Amino acid sequence: MTTYIHELPGWPSFDWDHASVGPALAAARHVQGRLLGQMEGLGFSMKADAVLRTLTHDVVKSSEIEGEALDTEQVRSSVARRLGMDIGGLKPVDRHVEGVVEMMLDATQRYDEPLTRERLFGWHAALFPTGRSGMHPIAVGAWRDDRTSSMQVVSGPVGRERVHFEAPAAARIDDEMQRFVDWFNRDPLEPVLKAAQAHLWFVTIHPFDDGNGRIARAIADMALARSESSPQRFYSMSAQIRIERADYYRILERTQRATLHVTPWIEWFLGCLTRAIEGAQVALTDIRAKARAWEQLREVPLNARQRLIINRLLDGFEGKLTTSKWAALTKSSQDTALRDVQQLLERGVLVRNSAGGRSTSYSLAPTSSPGGTP
């Protein structure tokens, strides 16, 4: 019979080999400090753009890890509105997206406030505004009660299920979570290491009917924000975990079936964090290219609709830009859209793509595109 770490004597006294973990922690802290230094050199608008991109990416990818696809534009609109950013053309947002964004922003913008049971209940209620996970009713804003069955993570067809993990019994959760939040708020452990341990500890308790992974990652992000003493997020741990999802689940399962000596998990988490921060360099390059593009356009007369669409194109417009899409995005008439496009063609900001007729579409001229030659 499998024994899980929450059943071991000494739980939850985690430990690890500090000599082995030290180099990985130093590497993560080095790239973290370097990125934050680079971001400090950016202007206000570029930093705001980086934060918007990062938080949008973080929310979308954290949900993707659980197999849930969110509308990126809805997430972006929700984040921008809650941060008071004027990005134009805000998209209507459904309440589920609003809830996911609300949880993530509460964790990162209020990182220095205590983590409490009531705060966790609020996050959970925000994730499940209908009181359902898919078609199934769940206990919302409350610990799971295991009335129907024990909490297991399983895969495979009915009758041949494979149990990856079984969480502590519901009767233990209240005490387990009180011990967890007390530790999170008071223990002086180095904050990046605390992010790694908190993630593992929370998903092992698995206190809710659903949403445990997303809340665990929000708690880790909260600890990482504490490590930087800043609510501004310039890299997404969830986006990197999404890339490494198979390894993520593999190391979690292996750790929960092993011992309280969790060196492999800590090393994996720190490595994933380092790769997430290094990946943010690509976004920084795009942001700088976008700033150069706007510098090239500073003398070009543009109306609000044209600025909105140019921003969308600089951010990586999905699909082809047509006058119909222009009209829809700017909430204008087809004639207005055509007039806006024609002005930008005449001013050398847009170029007409090769296909014509009903397929006529437009792109930014090379000198206005990220990476284009000035």
Image (cartoon, rainbow, N blue to C red):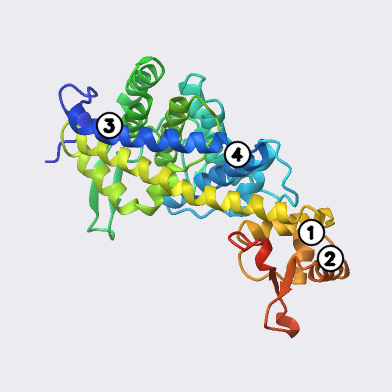
Q: Which residue is mark 3?
A: 168
Q: In whole angstroms, how far apart are the C-alphas of marks 1 and 4?
A: 25 Å
Residue 226: % across, % down = 46, 25
Q: Nearer the viewer, mark 4 or mark 2?
A: 4
Q: In whole angstroms, how far apart are the C-alphas of marks 1 and 2?
A: 7 Å
Asked if marks 4 and 3 touch (Cβ < 8 Å), the reply is no
- Which three-letter amino acid code belongs to the residue tagged 1? Gln
Say what secondary structure mark 3 lies in.
loop
Q: Nearer the viewer, residue 136 or 226?
A: 226
Residue at 35% across / 31% down in the picture?
A: 202
- Which three-letter amino acid code belongs to the residue tagged 3? Pro
- Which three-letter amino acid code belongs to the residue tagged 4? Leu
Asked if marks 1 and 2 touch (Cβ < 8 Å), the reply is yes
Residue 122: % across, % down = 53, 29
Residue 82: % across, % down = 66, 36
Asked if marks 2 and 3 touch (Cβ < 8 Å), the reply is no
Q: Is residue 119 left or right of residue 351?
A: left
Question: In this picture, is 116 found above or below 245?
Answer: above
Say what secondary structure mark 1 lies in.
helix
Q: Which residue is mark 1?
A: 306
Q: Which residue is mark 4?
A: 42
Q: Nearer the viewer, mark 3 or mark 1?
A: 1
Asked where in the image residue 348 lies, by quadrant, the reply is bottom right
Residue 171: % across, % down = 31, 25
Residue at 41% across / 18% down in the picture?
A: 185
Q: In whole angstroms, how far apart are the C-alphas of marks 3 and 1?
A: 56 Å
Specify which label sits upstream in the sequence, 1 or 2: 1
Q: In whole angstroms, how far apart are the C-alphas of marks 4 and 2?
A: 31 Å
Asked if marks 4 and 2 touch (Cβ < 8 Å), the reply is no
Check residue 340 in the rendering and tell me which mark sits there, or answer none: 2
